Amino acid sequence: MSTPCAAELPKEQKRFGSDGPGKEEIGDTFAVVDTETNWNDAVMSIGVVVADLKTRKKIDSVYYIIDPEYRVGGMFSEELRINEKGVRIADRKQALGEIRRWLDTYRVRMLFAYNASFDKNHLPEYSGYEWYDIMRLAAYRQYNRAIPASADCYKTGRLKQGYGVEDVLKMLSRNRGYRETHNAVLDAEDELQIMQLLGHEIKEYEIALLSDKGTGNR
């Protein structure tokens, strides 16, 4: 399908591809990762957003659809957006290898995800990275000031319900119309926004570092 030139692309279309880093963009960085799975619980798409460690502002993003896994279909197959500009289709080995090399260009060693044990367990090839669970702060009253006083929480401070990406981002942004897309790269951007709105320094996520078994430190 024909597309306008890059300068004219709508913001949402630009988010699916990467032109690589400029020298001024390489420094202290981290990445937010999101995966979507098919009916066989195999990864069918991966979205990764690189952000500045200090400002938490987005620097770049990539989005891969995994072939043949995506052909099996899944609950959110309609959100794959396979025809969008910048979407890359590759087998798992190629996709993960290219993503790793791309992360290396930004010197990324820290991966963040919402309910990160899910993504980490589905990406054992990336076990060498440090994985952090955004939910470990976002779902807890002591770290998320947007949680109302009336909310039902456990003694640990964690919400008993309503602590998924959609509920938490609605809470933090006060945008009641927000809906999670379940597209891997768009969800990764939303999860980065949660980190931005929480406003915590990266060092405060030390409690959210996953162990080798994929569970968060408590």
Image (spheres, grey):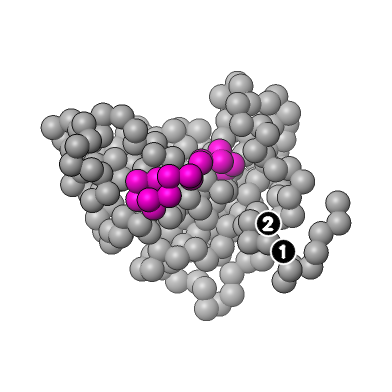
Which secondary structure class fits the magenta region best?
loop
Q: Could you say where residue 157 lies in the image, as x and y percent from the top left?
A: 18, 38
Residue 111 appears in the picture as rendered: no
Q: Could you say where residue 170 lies in the image, as x and y percent from the top left?
A: 40, 45
Tell me the residue at 65%/46% (across/down).
64
| Range of residues picked out in magenta | 169-184
In the image, farthest residue toward the right: 2
Tell me the residue at 60%/21% (across/down).
40
Mark 2 vs mark 1, CA separation in Å? 6 Å
Residue 146, compared with residue 50, is above or below; it is above
The amino acid beneath tag 1 is Leu
Instruction: Say which mark, if any, is on residue 13.
Output: 2
Q: Does the magenta stretch include residue 173?
A: yes
Instruction: Say which mark, if any, is on residue 118.
Output: none
Q: What element carries label 1?
A: loop
Q: Quadrant of residue 121?
A: top left
Which residue is the site of mark 1?
9
Toward the viewer: 179 or 71?
179
Asked if disc 2 and disc 1 are in contact, CB closer than 8 Å, the reply is yes
